[in-house]
Amino acid sequence: PTQKSDNNFANQIANSGAVSAAAVATAAVNAAVSMKSLTAPSVEKSYISLDSSNTAIDDEGLPLVYDKDVIETYWRKERGALNQRWSYFVGKAVPFLTKMVTLFISEGEINERHVPGLSKQARMDLQDLGATFIKLGQMMSVRPDILPQ
């Protein structure tokens, strides 16, 4: 009995190191997102049709015809929106991943009895995050190498 409990405790210590590393990585990515300046792609090697005579801008401040400078100006103005979106993503992802890691550490695996609840939570989080994440979830759902049956 002592040998088994020692191994279990050692595994928990080792796994908690992975959780700490994940928390540090999340903080580092968060800091990088906050500091990153966005730049629009150059059209020098592009097939985008450019009409320099059309300088119209929509209600949001985006050009109706691709204009690198106008797009970068828009992104600078909307800087807080990117940080808010990232924070919202982290707010959904970290609790979900923490729950999975906690289950793994406490039980040594993610038991089948937890799968329905985790699946429901993943679906709700992806829906809350929006269309891009819904599509990501759809793509992952048909990949048994990513999400086993």
Image (spheres, rainbow, N blue to C red):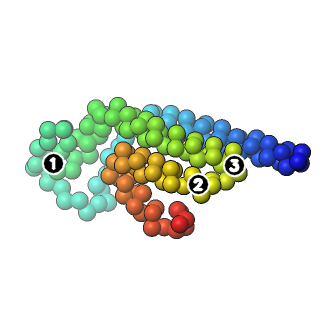
Observer able to see residue 136: yes
Circles 3 and 2, Cβ within 8 Å, touching? The answer is no
Give the SS element for disc 2: helix
- Describe residue 124's horizontal placement relative to residue 112 as left or right: left
Task: Work out whether residue 112 or residue 91 is closer to the camera in this orientation and state it.
Answer: 112
Between discs 3 and 2, the one toward the N terminus: 3
Give above or below for 54 relative to 138: above
Give above or below for 24 relative to 115: above
Label 2 neighbour load within 10 Å: few <14, some 14-19, many 20+: few
Mark 1–mark 2 Cα distance, whole angstroms, equals: 52 Å
Q: Residue at x 37, y 54 (%)?
A: 134
Q: Residue at x 18, y 55 (%)?
A: 50
Q: Residue at x 54, y 55 (%)?
A: 115
Observer able to see residue 69: no
Q: Residue at x 49, y 43 (%)?
A: 93
Q: Nearer the viewer, mark 1 or mark 3?
A: 3
Residue 37 shows which numbered tag? none
Circles 1 and 3, Cβ within 8 Å, touching? The answer is no
- Describe residue 126's horizontal placement relative to residue 5 as left or right: left
Mark 3–mark 2 Cα distance, whole angstroms, equals: 12 Å
Q: Nearer the viewer, mark 1 or mark 2?
A: 2
Residue 113 shows which numbered tag? 2
Between discs 1 and 2, the one toward the N terminus: 1
Give the SS element for disc 3: helix
Residue 64 shows which numbered tag? 1
x, y percentage for residue 143? 48, 67
Asked which quadrant contains residue 44, the reply is bottom left
x, y percentage for residue 130? 34, 48
- Describe residue 76's horizontal placement relative to residue 139 as left or right: left
Q: Nearer the viewer, mark 3 or mark 2?
A: 2
> What amino acid is labelled 1 in the image?
Leu
> What amino acid is labelled 2 in the image?
Arg
